[in-house]
Amino acid sequence: MATASPRISRKELRQPDWFQLASESAIEYYSAHKTLVFSATAAVIVVLAVIWGWQAFKTKQNIEASQEFTTALSLYQSEKYRDAIPAFEKVKTYRWSKYSVLAHLYLANSYIATKELDKALSEAQRSLIATKPNTLYRQIALFTLANVEEQKSQCPAAIEHYGEAQRIAGALQVSAALGKARCAEQTGDTKTAIATYKEIVKENPGSPYALKVSELEAKTTQGAVKP
């Protein structure tokens, strides 16, 4: 059998409900703080407009930079380095684009190819500043910088940067380790060279650099027994 719903008294009907109370409170607050409400709303609109405008600007920069980068990369891959240099310089002007960092890296390598090592060093240093720590881009920037320093016979600096590149997990770890060992050997730091070659052999069993370790250890032993 259905039960009758509880009856609401006239007194309860005359009492305002929660929605009515909330609505009236909101209207009263709005009336008392109309200027503040309008100001806050306007501020939110401005912030949203700025965010949207910034995102639109970055998107536009990336699209335009991508087109310029494709042209520059084609010249670089065709080994037209002197033509690629101004093309990558143009890509650099899109400084808020992700392609700007790549432009610095390719410019450095273009200058290495044209034997303009001072300019290569400058671009490599800029690329290092523009990259984030522990990323592949940072590893490439460090390796490129160390490569230029090695060619300029600045081996102590090259050893440091090759070492930093080696500590980043990425495609250039072994190449960076080889550069570090090579520079250490050139400066007469046989201990560092042997230790670095051993790291390479440990990570790459069967590596031919095991012979290099034996060769350097033999030279060290011979030097130690000489009167």
Image (cartoon, rainbow, N blue to C red):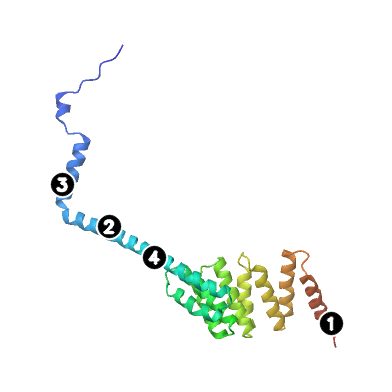
Residue 143 to residue 117: above or below: above
Mark 1: amino acid: Gln
Report if the CB atoms under discs 4 and 3 are less than 8 Å apart: no
Secondary structure category for the residue under label 3: helix
Q: Which-is-in-front pick, marks 2 and 1?
A: 2
Mark sitting earlier along the chain (2/3):
3
Residue with the mark numbered 3: 28
The residue under the point 78% across, 65% down is: 206
- Towards the viewer: 70 or 189: 70
The Cα atoms of the two marked residues, 4 and 2, are separated by 24 Å
Residue with the mark numbered 4: 60
- Towards the viewer: 163 or 57: 57
Mark sitting earlier along the chain (4/1):
4
- Label 2 neighbour load within 10 Å: few <14, some 14-19, many 20+: few
The residue under the point 71% across, 72% down is: 196
Res. 188 image quadrant: bottom right
Q: What mark, if any, has residue 44 been given in the picture?
A: 2
Q: What mark, if any, has residue 222 been given in the picture?
A: 1
The Cα atoms of the two marked residues, 2 and 1, are separated by 77 Å
Q: Which-is-in-front pick, marks 4 and 3?
A: 4
Q: Which-is-in-front pick, marks 4 and 1?
A: 4
The Cα atoms of the two marked residues, 4 and 1, are separated by 65 Å
Q: Which-is-in-front pick, marks 4 and 2?
A: 4
- Quadrant of the snapshot with the N terminus: top left
Mark 4: amino acid: Lys
Mark sitting earlier along the chain (2/1):
2
Report if the CB atoms under discs 4 and 2 are less than 8 Å apart: no
Report if the CB atoms under discs 3 and 1 are less than 8 Å apart: no
Secondary structure category for the residue under label 2: helix
> Is residue 60 among what the camera can see?
yes
